[in-house]
Amino acid sequence: MTIKKFWLSLIFGMVIGVLISLLIYPDDPLFFQYSAEYPGASMMINEMDFNMLFNYLVVIFISVLVIFSAWTIFEKRMTKHE
């Protein structure tokens, strides 16, 4: 049961964490572009914003921990009352 609880809390935590991240950071893009001017050439460079990615992952990790902890506490209280 613990493995099933872990996987379900991981999946639901990831889904809920992504939704919360999109609500918290609605206007912050994960990728950004800038132009680089070189002699004789001009280029558009795409880069990933690793700070934003880290913020997303922190929210996802916290949501997984909250769901797993709440589920564990709920299970302990229900077995205590039986």
Image: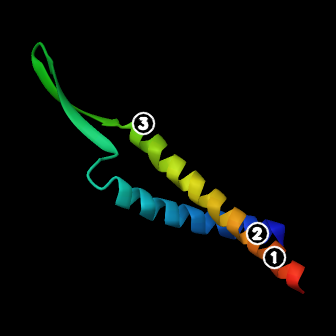
What is the C-alpha distance between the residues marked 2 and 3? 34 Å
Mark 1 belongs to which amino acid?
Arg
Numbered label attached to residue 13: none
Q: Residues within 10 Å of mark 2 (few under 14, many from 20)?
A: few
Q: Position of residue 16 (x, y in %)?
A: 51, 66
Q: Check the image and tell me how it is coloured.
A: rainbow
Residue bearing the label numbered 1: 77
Q: Residues within 10 Å of mark 3 (few under 14, many from 20)?
A: few
Residue drawn at x 51%, y 52% as measured from the top left = 59
Residue drawn at x 63%, y 61% as measured from the top left = 66
The reply to whether callout 1 and callout 2 are in contact (CB within 8 Å) is yes
Q: Earlier in the sequence, mark 2 or mark 3?
A: 3
Q: Is residue 78 left or right of residue 19?
A: right
The answer to which quarter of the image holds residue 67 is bottom right
Q: Quadrant of the C terminus?
A: bottom right
Residue mark closest to the camera, 1 vs 3: 1
Front in this rendered view, residue 7 or 59: 59
In the depicted structure, whether residue 6 falls above or below residue 30? below
Mark 3 belongs to which amino acid?
Phe
In the rendered image, the residue lying farthest to the bottom is 82
Task: Name the secondary structure under disc 1.
Answer: helix
The answer to which quarter of the image holds residue 78 is bottom right
Residue drawn at x 81%, y 76% as measured from the top left = 77
In the depicted structure, whether residue 69 falls above or below residue 34? below
Residue drawn at x 58%, y 63% as measured from the top left = 13
Q: Is residue 53 left or right of residue 8?
A: left
Task: Name the secondary structure under disc 3.
Answer: helix
Residue bearing the label numbered 3: 50
Q: Residues within 10 Å of mark 1 (few under 14, many from 20)?
A: few
Residue bearing the label numbered 2: 73
Q: Position of residue 15 (x, y in %)?
A: 52, 66
